[in-house]
C-alpha cells in the first residue's frame, strides 16, 4: 500500500467513479497490490524473514509504500 | 572519452541516446545489455528511456536489480558520471542512487509534449553549457513522472541545491500551471550529493538536433562531454 501522505491519483479516480455510480459516503480510497506466491520453506518464522527480505529488496518501494505479510497453509 | 548506454528489454530511447552521444563525442558508445555485469571503462553512462520489463511491479523496479545496474551503481559510487533519462531516472531512484520516487502523473494521463525547464544551476558536469536559471525546451513522454519525496528528503535536496531542473513557463517562471505531472516543487530532475549522477524525466536526446525542431538537449550532451574531457 502507498504510505499515508503519499498522494494516490488512481485511488482518487476510483473514489470519483464510485461516487458517480451512486455509492455515497465513500472516502479515502487507496489502491495497492497483492502479490501471492508459494514458498518451499515450511518454518513460518523463516518464511516470514525471507519474505521480508523480498519486500525490502524488490517487492515494495519503502520510499512510498508499506507492506504487510500474510502466511497461509 | 568513452561512453556507454545500458539497454534493457523495453528500452526505446537507447538509439536516440547513442545518436546524441556519437554526435557529442565523435565515437561510438558501448551498448551494454542488461544481463552483462561487465562494463568497459567509460567516463559517462546513460540509462535511457523506455518501459523496461513492461513496467511490471513498479516502473524501474526490475531493471534496478539487473546485473548491468549493479555495476552502474558501483561505478556511480566511484564517481563515474551517470545520466538517467525518463525510465532511466525511475531506475536510478529504484537503485537508491537518487532519492524519492516517480509516481503516476497527477492527471493519470500519459503526457507527450515539449515543456520548459529552468536550469537550477549551471556549475555541474551536465549543465555547464547552459546559462544559469535559463529556460530550455525539452520534450517529456511519460505516464509516471510525478516526483515524490518525503519532507525531510525534499529539505535536503533544496538545502544542498540538488534540484537540477524545474518545470517552468517559457520565461523561466516556476508556476503551478507549468507543472505537467504534479511533481512536488515542480521538480523535473535531481542530482546525487556528489553531482555525478543526474536523473531527469524530460528527454534531452529527443531535441538534440535542429532537424528535430530544437537543439536545447544537444547542449547537455556536448556540455557533459566537454566537461569530462577537460
Image: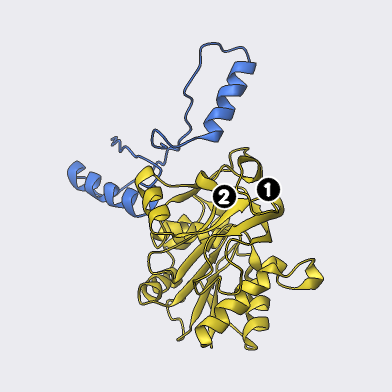
Residue at 25% over, 50% down: A50
Chain the render paints yellow: B
**Image point (60%, 23%), residue name:** A16
Which residue lies under the disc numbered 1?
B111
Co-location on one chain, circles 1 and 2: yes
Residue B72 visible, this orientation: yes
Q: Which mark is residue B215?
A: none
Looking at the rendered structure, the secondary structure element under dot 1 is: strand
Are there few (<14), some (14-19), or many (20+) residues within 10 Å of tag 1?
A: some
Image quadrant where residue B7 sits: bottom right
Note the chain letter of the blue one: A
Measured from the top left, where is residue B60 in percent x and y? 50, 57
Q: Is residue B22 above or below residue A43?
A: below
Number of numbered discs: 2
Q: Position of residue B14 (x, y in %)?
A: 62, 70
Question: Foreground: B24 or B74?
Answer: B24
The image quarter containing residue B223 is bottom right
Per the image, the residue denoted by label 2 is: B145
The residue drawn where x is 22% and y is 48% is A49
Distance between the alpha carbons at the discs numbered 1 and 2: 9 Å
Side (left or right) of B194 relative to A70:
right
Locate residue B110 relative to residue B89 in the image: left or right. right
Q: Are marks 1 and 2 in contact (CB under 8 Å)?
A: yes
Q: Residue at x 46, y 23 (%)?
A: A28
Chain to which mark 1 belongs: B
Residue sitting nearer the eye, B43 or B33: B43
Other-residue count near label 2 (Cα within 10 Å), few / some / many at <14 / 14–19 / ≥20 = many
Judge from the rendering whether residue A59 lies leftward or rightward of residue B105; answer left or right.
Answer: left
Amino acid at each position: 500500500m502507498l504510505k499515508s501522505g503519499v498522494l494516490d491519483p488512481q485511488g482518487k479516480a476510483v473514489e470519483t467513479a464510485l461516487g458517480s455510480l451512486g455509492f455515497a459516503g465513500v472516502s479515502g480510497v487507496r489502491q495497492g497490490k497483492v502479490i501471492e506466491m508459494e514458498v518451499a520453506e515450511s518454518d513460518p518464522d523463516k518464511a516470514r524473514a525471507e519474505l521480508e527480505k523480498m519486500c525490502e529488496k524488490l517487492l515494495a518501494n519503502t520510499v512510498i509504500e508499506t507492506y504487510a505479510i500474510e502466511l497461509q497453509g | 572519452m568513452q561512453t556507454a548506454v545500458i539497454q534493457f528489454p523495453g528500452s526505446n530511447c537507447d538509439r536516440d541516446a547513442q545518436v546524441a552521444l556519437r554526435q557529442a563525442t565523435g565515437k561510438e558508445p558501448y551498448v551494454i545489455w542488461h544481463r552483462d555485469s561487465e562494463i568497459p571503462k567509460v567516463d559517462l553512462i546513460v540509462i535511457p528511456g523506455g518501459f523496461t520489463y513492461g513496467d511490471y511491479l513498479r516502473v524501474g523496479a526490475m531493471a534496478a536489480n539487473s546485473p548491468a545496474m549493479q555495476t552502474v551503481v558501483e561505478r556511480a559510487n566511484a564517481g563515474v558520471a551517470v545520466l538517467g533519462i525518463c525510465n532511466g531516472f525511475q531506475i536510478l531512484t529504484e537503485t537508491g542512487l537518487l532519492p524519492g520516487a516517480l509516481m503516476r502523473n497527477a492527471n493519470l494521463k500519459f503526457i507527450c509534449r515539449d515543456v520548459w525547464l529552468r536550469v537550477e544551476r549551471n556549475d555541474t558536469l551536465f549543465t555547464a553549457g547552459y546559462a544559469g536559471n535559463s529556460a530550455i525546451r525539452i520534450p517529456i513522454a511519460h505516464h509516471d513522472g510525478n516526483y515524490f519525496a518525503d519532507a525531510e528528503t525534499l529539505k535536503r535536496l533544496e538545502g544542498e541545491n540538488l534540484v537540477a531542473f524545474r518545470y517552468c513557463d517559457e520565461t523561466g517562471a516556476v508556476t503551478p500551471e507549468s507543472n505537467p505531472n504534479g511533481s512536488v516543487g515542480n521538480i523535473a530532475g535531481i542530482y546525487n550529493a556528489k553531482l555525478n549522477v543526474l536523473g531527469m524525466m524530460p528527454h534531452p536526446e529527443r531535441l538534440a538536433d535542429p532537424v528535430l525542431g530544437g537543439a536545447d538537449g544537444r547542449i547537455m550532451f556536448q556540455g557533459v562531454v566537454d566537461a569530462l574531457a577537460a
